[in-house]
Amino acid sequence: MGPFLFKRILTLIATLIGASIVVFLVLEILPGNAAEIMMGPDASPDAVQALAIQLGLDQPAWERYWHWVAGMLTGNLGNSYAYSSPVSELLLERLSLTIPLAIMAMCLTTVLALVVGIYAAANHNRIGDVGLMGMTQVGIAIPNFWFAILLILFFSVKLQWFSAGGFPGWEEGVWPGLQSLLLPALSLAVVQSAILARITRSAVLEVMREDYVRTARAKGLSQRATLWGHVLRNAMIPVITVMGLQAAELLAGTIVVENVFYLPGLGRLIFQSISNRDLIVVRNCVMFLAAMVVVVNFVVDILYAVIDPRVKASDI
């Protein structure tokens, strides 16, 4: 496990460095001066010059990049131009909503997808399988923001069970906070669970055709015992791959859903920062999302080795 883990850690560090270079260069090659973009076309030259010095734009690009990376390592991400506060504080404040929302959405996605996928595979080519796969096809075609609007109309406007938007804050209690995140999490989970359910069904069906599964059935094991004891663990590799991609995608997907439900999370912060031309916040938020994708993929690689030792052995 040691060499395998060491290689994965080196890959993680190299990918993070590459992502930081790409994020930095993308904002560097934007047409015009970053200070001019942030101040707007009506700003005076003196104000633009003062902001450029404050942002360090009078320094070479490599030096600005180094200061940015060093700041990320020490927690000093600079100050927001629009909010006049440290970017690190803004991120921590917004992540206290976005991370619970993404975790709720991922839990709902996993439960729905595994239940539907396993049931469909166990009832292959029967009415339950055909009906559920038809519903997942509809789920894949529905944009999450449109489903979010439907949830608001039904549960908030018609039934009045949930608030149509907003977040009371965790200081008001855990249950009110979770209640306000339930509809946004469900709107995020529907599309992702439809995709994952189809992957789960395909993976389970493929493993069920293996010789050792037929041998287990021939020895007298029931379909349920064979499914839970022999099939699921070997079918989890492609499922975990998709789950890792979806976990990162759910963080990015909150940008739209948080605006639909008017939630003060990371997605809304990115949207507002783009509108306010606050490039410092945009750069750090994009880098954070990129880092989350890389870290999730790292965790998925480790889970591969835990679930199937052959992956670890073939990689050394």
Image (cartoon, rainbow, N blue to C red):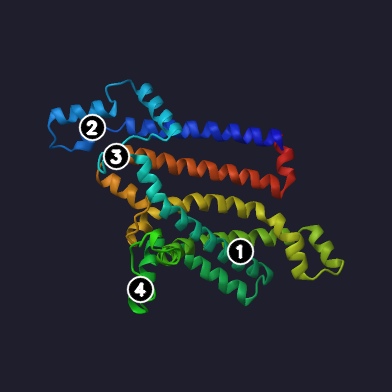
Position of residue 129 in the picture relative to residue 309 (left or right)? left
Vertical relation: 254 (above or below) 183: above
Q: Amino acid at mark 4?
A: Ser
Farthest-out residue, bottom: 159
Q: For the point 65% across and 33% down, which residue is it?
A: 6
- Which numbered disc, 1 or 4, marks the residue closer to the eye? 4
Q: Amino acid at mark 3?
A: Ser
Q: Which residue is mark 3?
A: 80
Position of residue 200 in the picture relative to residue 174 (left or right)? right
Residue 295 spot, x, y in % from top left: 54, 42
Q: Report, in whole angstroms, how far the alpha carbon at label 3 lies from the one at label 1.
A: 42 Å
Q: Which residue is mark 1?
A: 114
Of mark 1 and mark 4, the one earlier in the sequence is 1
Residue 204 spot, x, y in % from top left: 68, 61
Indicate which disc residue 139 carries.
none
Q: Which residue is mark 2?
A: 35
Determine the secondary structure under disc 1.
Answer: helix
Q: Report, in whole angstroms, how far the alpha carbon at label 3 lies from the one at label 2.
A: 13 Å
- Which numbered disc, 3 or 4, marks the residue closer to the eye? 3
Of mark 1 and mark 2, the one earlier in the sequence is 2
Depth order, front residue of 114/55: 55
Of mark 3 and mark 1, the one earlier in the sequence is 3
Indicate which disc residue 156 carries.
4
Position of residue 205 in the picture relative to residue 151 (left or right)? right
Q: Splitting the image into 4 quarters, where does residue 144 fall?
A: bottom left
